[in-house]
Amino acid sequence: MEEQYPELTDRIQSTFIDMLFVIILAFIAGGLLDRYEQVPDWVRMVLFISLFVLYEPVCLVLGCTLGNYLKGIRVRRFSDASRRIGLLQAFIRYPVKVLLGWISFITIRTNPRKRAIHDLVSGTVMIRLQR
C-alpha cells in the first residue's frame, strides 16, 4: 500500500490545535496551583516548561498528539513508516521544529514525501492515515 502524505495546511492546523491544547492545559494547571497557598515559583516554572517541552515528543512516542489525531496524520520513522518514532527522534525533531518555526516547512513543496526540515533532520516522515 502506498503511503499518503498530508498537505501543508493539515500540518499547520494540527500544530495550531496542539498549541491551543497546551495553552489550555497551562491555564488549567495555573488554576489548580492557585488553589494552594504558597506554591513555590520553581514548581510553577517546572510544570509550565514541562508542558511545553514534553507534550509533543511524549505524545509522538506514544502515538500522536491531539492535533495529529484530529487531522488523521501521524509522525513515523522515515526508514519504516509503519513504526512509531523513538524518544531520541522525538527529542531531536521537536527543538528543530520550534527553533526554525515556519521556515522548517519550506521543504514540503519540493520534497516528494512532503518532509519538513525537522523531519529531514530527525529521520521522520508525516503520513496520512488510510481512510
Image (cartoon, rainbow, N blue to C red):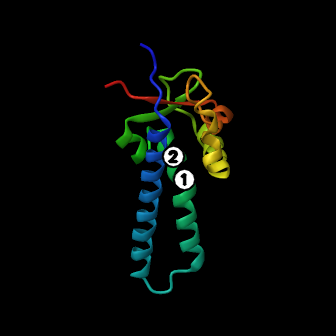
Residue identifier under label 1: 54
Give how far across and how far down residue 17 sits, in percent: 42, 52
Residue 35 falls in which quadrant of the image? bottom left
Residue ranking furthest to the top:
1
Residue at figure coordinates x 54%, y 58% from the top left: 52
Number of residues whose C-alpha sits closer than 10 Å to that of mark 2, classed few (under 14), some (14–19) or many (20 or more): some
Helix, strand or loop at mark 2: helix
* Amino acid type shown at disc 2: Val
Q: Is residue 75 above or below residue 102?
A: above
Residue 79, quarter of the rendered image = top right
Q: Is residue 121 above or below residue 1?
A: below
Where residue 81 appears, x then y in whole percent? 51, 23
> Which three-letter amino acid code belongs to the residue tagged 1?
Leu
Give residue 57's position: percent from left, percent from top: 54, 46
Q: At x 59% / y 41%, what residue is drawn?
A: 90
* Disc 2 target residue: 58
Do the residues bearing badges 1 and 2 touch, measured as CB atoms within 8 Å? yes
- 14 displayed left or right of 103: left
Quarter-wise, where is residue 125 in the image?
top right
Rendered location of residue 102, percent (x, y): 61, 48
> Badge 1 local density, few (<14 within 10 Å), some, or many (20+)?
some
Quarter occupied by the N terminus = top left
The residues bearing labels 1 and 2 have C-alpha atoms spaced at a distance of 6 Å
Q: Secondary structure at mark 1?
A: helix
Identify the residue at the far left of this view.
131
Q: Residue at x 58, y 31 (%)?
A: 109
